[in-house]
Image (spheres, grey):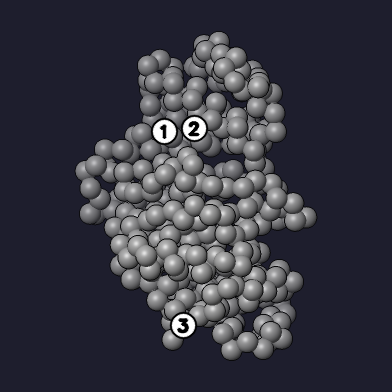
C-alpha cells in the first residue's frame, strides 16, 4: 500500500490536470498514489490520465456532483496512511511530500502539517507568497474560529484524524465555497494536532478574479459554517463563549473585503450586522474596526494602495460609525502611507 494518497478532483480542465500530475510525478518522494476523481467532465479525462502510463495514477469517473462529493469519494478510495489534496488547478513543489512526511515522522503527535504557498494568477504570475505562520503561529481550538489560513494543497493529514470525523466534506457547500474551511475547522475542533512546516511548498492558482458579485454566496457559506459549529452537541464552554466575538470578527472581515471590491452597500450592510452582534463597536470596542482596517489595508490580494483604501472607507462608513472617521484617519499617519 502507498504511504500517501493524493486526492485530485477535476472537472473539464484536462490541460491543468496534466500540469498537476506532472508536479506530482516530479516529487522527490515516490511512495504515493494519486486518486483522480473525474467529476463528470465532458469528454472524460480517462485517456488524459492514461497517457502518463504510471500505475500510481488511479482514475475514477463520477456523475457530476460537485467538489465536496468528489473529495469524499476520493477519501473512500484512498489507501494511504497520509492524505493530501491536489486540485486540478494547483501544483506541488518538488520536495513538498518529502519534507512534510519527514516532519510528520519526526513529530508523531502532529496529525495535520501545513506549509506555505504561492498565489498564482491565470497567467502564471505570482501575486503573493503566503507564510501563514507569520501571522498565526498556532492553530488550535482557542483560535481556529477566527480564521483558517490553510488551503487543501498546502496540507498533509494523517488518515486517523480524518476517521474521527462523523462526516468528511459537507455536500451542503456545493458552490465551491466553504467546504474546505468547514472540514479543517472540524478536524482541529475534534482534537487533531496541527503544526506549521515553515516552507513554501505549493502553488495555489486563482484563475478567476473574485469581486463583489460573489460576496453574498461566500458570506452565506461561512455563516452556515459558524451556525453549524455552534450547534455541535459536544462543544466546549470555552468555544461557546466566543460566539459573539467570532461572529463580529466574521462580519467585519466581509466588510473590509466588500470595500476593497467596491461593493459599498454590501460593506455597510456587513458593518451594520457587526454592530448588531457587538453594540459597543461605536464606542469602547471601536478598536476592532480601527485595527481591522489597518490590517486589511496591507492585504496585497485585495488592496493595491493602502492609503486610498482607507480614504474610501472613511468616505463610506454607515451613519452609526461615521464619528470614527477621525480616529481611523490616524492610521494613515502611523505607517500606512509609508
On screen, residue 329 above or below 16 = above
Residue 9 percent coordinates (x, y): 58, 71
**Residue at coordinates 55% horizontally, 26% vertically from top-left?**
294
Residue 45 percent coordinates (x, y): 69, 80
Observer-nearest of 66 and 152 = 152
On screen, residue 78 above or below 90 = below
- Assess disc 3: are there few (<14), some (14-19) or many (≥20) residues with their C-alpha within 10 Å of its C-alpha: some
Look at the image and tell me whether residue 57 can be seen: yes
**Residue at coordinates 40% horizontally, 61% vertically from top-left?**
112
Q: Which residue is mark 3?
A: 2
Q: Which residue is mark 2?
A: 252
Q: What is the distance, in whole Å, between disc 2 and disc 3 at their CAs? A: 44 Å
**Residue at coordinates 54% horizontally, 75% vertically from top-left?**
29
- Numbered disc 3: secondary structure: loop
Left or right, 303 with respect to 219, comes to right
Q: What is the distance, in whole Å, between disc 3 and disc 1 at their CAs? A: 44 Å
Observer-nearest of 270 and 114 = 114
- Of the image marks 3 and 1, the number of the one nearer the N terminus: 3
Residue 276 percent coordinates (x, y): 41, 28
Mark 3 vs mark 1: in front: 3
Q: Which residue is mark 1?
A: 248
- Numbered disc 1: secondary structure: helix
- Of the image marks 2 and 3, the number of the one nearer the N terminus: 3
Give the quadrant of residue 325: top right
Question: Is there CB contact under 8 Å for labels 1 and 2?
Answer: yes
Residue 51 percent coordinates (x, y): 71, 86
Amino acid at each position: 500500500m502507498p504511504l500517501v494518497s493524493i486526492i485530485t478532483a477535476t472537472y473539464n480542465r484536462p490541460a491543468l490536470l496534466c500540469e498537476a500530475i506532472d508536479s506530482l510525478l516530479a516529487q522527490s518522494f515516490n511512495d504515493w498514489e494519486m486518486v483522480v476523481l473525474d467529476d463528470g467532465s465532458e469528454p472524460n479525462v480517462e485517456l488524459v490520465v492514461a497517457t502518463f502510463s504510471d500505475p500510481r495514477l488511479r482514475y475514477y469517473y463520477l456523475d457530476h456532483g460537485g467538489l465536496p462529493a468528489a473529495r469524499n469519494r476520493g477519501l473512500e478510495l484512498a489507501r494511504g496512511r497520509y492524505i493530501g489534496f491536489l486540485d486540478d488547478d494547483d501544483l506541488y513543489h518538488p520536495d513538498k511530500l518529502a519534507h512534510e512526511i519527514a516532519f510528520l515522522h519526526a513529530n508523531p503527535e502532529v496529525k495535520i502539517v501545513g506549509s506555505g504557498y504561492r498565489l498564482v494568477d491565470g497567467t502564471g504570475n505570482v501575486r503573493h507568497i503566503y507564510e501563514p505562520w507569520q501571522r498565526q503561529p498556532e492553530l488550535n481550538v482557542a483560535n481556529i474560529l477566527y480564521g483558517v489560513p490553510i488551503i487543501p494543497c498546502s496540507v498533509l493529514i494523517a488518515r486517523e484524524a480524518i476517521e474521527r470525523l462523523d462526516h468528511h466534506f459537507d455536500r451542503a457547500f456545493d458552490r465551491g465555497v466553504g467546504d474546505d474551511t468547514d472540514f479543517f475547522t472540524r478536524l482541529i475542533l475534534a482534537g487533531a494536532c496541527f503544526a506549521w512546516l515553515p516552507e513554501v511548498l505549493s502553488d495555489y492558482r486563482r484563475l478567476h478574479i473574485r469581486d463583489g458579485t460573489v460576496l453574498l454566496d461566500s458570506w452565506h457559506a461561512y455563516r452556515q459554517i459558524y451556525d453549524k459549529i455552534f450547534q455541535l452537541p459536544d462543544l466546549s464552554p470555552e468555544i461557546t463563549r466566543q460566539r459573539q466575538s467570532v461572529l463580529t470578527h466574521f462580519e467585519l472581515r466581509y466588510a473590509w473585503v466588500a470595500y476593497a471590491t467596491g461593493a459599498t452597500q454590501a460593506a455597510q450592510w456587513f458593518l451594520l450586522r457587526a454592530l448588531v452582534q457587538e453594540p459597543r463597536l461605536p464606542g469602547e470596542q471601536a478598536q476592532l474596526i480601527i485595527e481591522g482596517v489597518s490590517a486589511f489595508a496591507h492585504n496585497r490580494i485585495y488592496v493595491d494602495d493602502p492609503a486610498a483604501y482607507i480614504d474610501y472607507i472613511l468616505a463610506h462608513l454607515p451613519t452609526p460609525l461615521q464619528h470614527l472617521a477621525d480616529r481611523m484617519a490616524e492610521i494613515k499617519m502611523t505607517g500606512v502611507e509609508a
